[in-house]
Image (cartoon, rainbow, N blue to C red):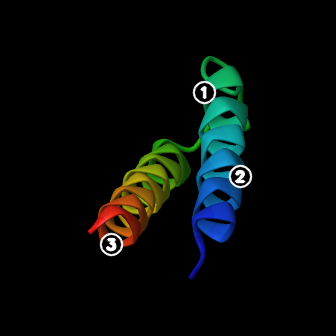
Amino acid sequence: MSEKDAVSRLAEAKRLVTQELHKQGTPEYDPRSHERAIEAERKAQDALDAERASSTS
C-alpha cells in the first residue's frame, strides 16, 4: 500500500467516525457502529504510520 492510499483510508475512516459522532442523541445512533468506526480509524492510522516508517528507512 502506498502512503497516498493509507492517507485516503485514514481520511475515510475519520469521516465515518464523524458521521457516527453526529448521530449521538438520535434514534439512529448505534454505539457498536461508533466503536467499529473508531477501531477502523485506529487501524488506518497504524497502517499510515507503518507506511511512513517503512518509506523513511
The residue pinned by badge 2 equals 12
Q: Quadrant of residue 17?
A: top right
Estimate the spatial distance between the alpha carbons at disc 3 and disc 2, rounded to whole Å. 22 Å
Please report the residue visible at 45 percent of the width from the left and 52 percent of the height from the top.
32
The residue most toward the top is 25
Q: Which image quadrant: the C terminus?
A: bottom left
Q: Which image quadrant: the N terminus?
A: bottom right
Please report the residue visible at 71 percent of the width from the left and 58 percent of the height from the top.
8
Residue 6 horizontal/vertical position (percent) = 58, 64
The residue pinned by badge 3 equals 54
Q: Mark 2 against mark 1, which lies toward the viewer?
A: 2
The residue pinned by badge 1 equals 21
Residue 48 horizontal/vertical position (percent) = 45, 59
Say how many tags the image has.
3
Q: Within 10 angstroms of label 2, few (less than 14), some, or many (20 or more) residues?
A: some
Tell me the element at label 2.
helix
**Up/down of 49 relative to 24, above or below:** below
Q: Within 10 angstroms of label 3, few (less than 14), some, or many (20 or more) residues?
A: few
Tell me the element at label 1.
helix
Q: Amino acid at mark 1?
A: Leu
Tell me the element at label 3.
helix
Q: Mark 3 against mark 2, which lies toward the viewer?
A: 3
Q: Amino acid at mark 3?
A: Ser
Estimate the spatial distance between the alpha carbons at disc 2 and disc 1, rounded to whole Å. 14 Å
Q: Within 10 angstroms of label 1, few (less than 14), some, or many (20 or more) residues?
A: some
